[in-house]
Amino acid sequence: MSRNDVIDAINIRQPARIPFTIEYRAETEKILRKDLLIPEDTTLSRFFGCDEFCSIWTILGKGPVFPVKSIQTPGVTTDVWGVERKKINTGTVEYWEISHYPLADAETSADIEKYHWPDADAVILPEIPAGFNFLQARGERVVLDMSCIGPFGIAWSLLGMEKMLMDMYINPSVVSATVSCIEKYTLTLMKRLCKTYPGCIDLVGCGDDYGTQTNLFLSPESIKEFFMPSLKRHYSAAARFGAKGYHHSCGAVFGIIDQFIDAGVNVLNPIQTSAAGMIPARLKKEFGSRLAFHGGIDINETLRTGSPSDVRDEVRSRINELGPNGYILAPTHVLQPDSRPENVAALYDEVRRYCI
């Protein structure tokens, strides 16, 4: 594990070796520990020799206290925006699915503005204890904050996806007002984080998914009009505090990567190579001088149904196509329980062997 390798990749410099990471569901962890005989006192990241991203809360050992909008009940949770989710079972995996869109009945921008929006100043941020050695506690990890930005994802969670997409054409002021009200909270909170923990945050990120398997959810023109200006204001503010921009978007997003870069994105994740147009060599040729890539190892097919040999071939191919500078190797999403343990083992064994 080497922080310098990750930082070099983020800055599109050639690292001493290709950095690589892992992220997984709890159900996946149980399977991997059992099948690969991973000791309980060893993290999967350490077992595979991975580099690590972490939040500042992990380093401090405590997180912020957010204003609560409603009482939590078993199997149901309500977030700071008032979006309600219920736990559902899909096979052996539990997911949280939205069960209530609080702005589903909003018809005007006035309806949006009168909603009870959260107050960023009401969030209580933990202090860095006196004498706390942040650098020592951080170690070789890279600090990524994903807690604030989300003009697209938060907006459709409040309005409902179908309603939001329709309103963009028949009632655009509703969408614009929603994004504006979201930003008042998220941008204020992000600036508070950067000021409270100066020099501690390496990357600020957004998890908005703009792509499907075959195309974008909406037109590039609509994304540029409604959501990119807010993204740019967030990433520009973060840059003033020395933090780079990180964006996670699944799917076929080739058509808006220039927009991401213009908005201040330095690292794009997860590089879903099974989606239309997401051809690694093409991505590197078009954007590799301006953008770092994180991901690229397919969880849809290769890790799920391929052989260890297929995985090893893909690892070498991705490194050759997306590296050696500006690339952090990883699966194309959080590892799901259907990723074969022998394939996961082959992935990390091959990247270690190939990068020596």
Image (spheres, helix red, strand yellow):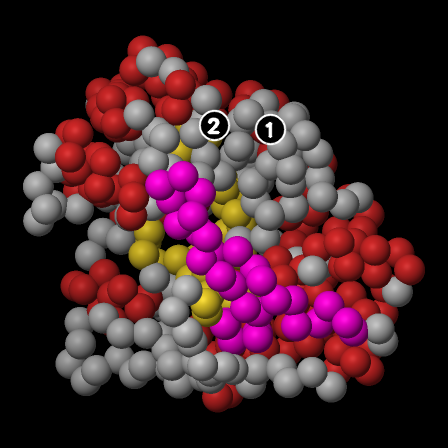
For label 1, the SS is loop
Relative vertical location of residue 84 with respect to residue 18 in this rendering, above or below = below
Residue at x 47% of width, y 27% of height: 300
Q: Is residue 131 left or right of residue 148?
A: left
Horizontal and vertical percent position of residue 160: 69, 60
Tell me the distance, in whole angstroms, between the alpha carbons under discs 1 and 2: 10 Å
Magenta part of the chain: 78-106
Label 1 belongs to which residue?
A: 275
Q: Quadrant of the N terminus?
A: top left
Q: Is residue 294 magenta?
A: no
Q: Is residue 83 magenta?
A: yes
Question: In the visual, does 323 lie left or right of 214?
Answer: left
* Residue drawn at (49%, 61%) of the image: 86
Q: Amino acid at mark 2?
A: Asn
Q: Vertically, is 259 above or below 230?
A: above
**Residue 124 in view of the camera:** yes
* Residue type, label 1: Ala
Q: Secondary structure at mark 2?
A: loop
Q: Residues within 10 Å of mark 2 (few under 14, many from 20)?
A: some
Between 114 and 248, the one nearer to me in the picture: 114
Q: Nearer the viewer, residue 24 or 90?
A: 90
Judge whether 89 appears above or below 225 on screen: above
On screen, residue 249 versus residue 60, left or right, reads right
Residue 135 seen anywhere in this rendered image of the structure: no
What's the mark number on residue 300? Answer: 2
Query: Residue 265 placed where, x, y %?
Result: 57, 50
- Residue 130 image position (x, y, % from top left): 19, 84
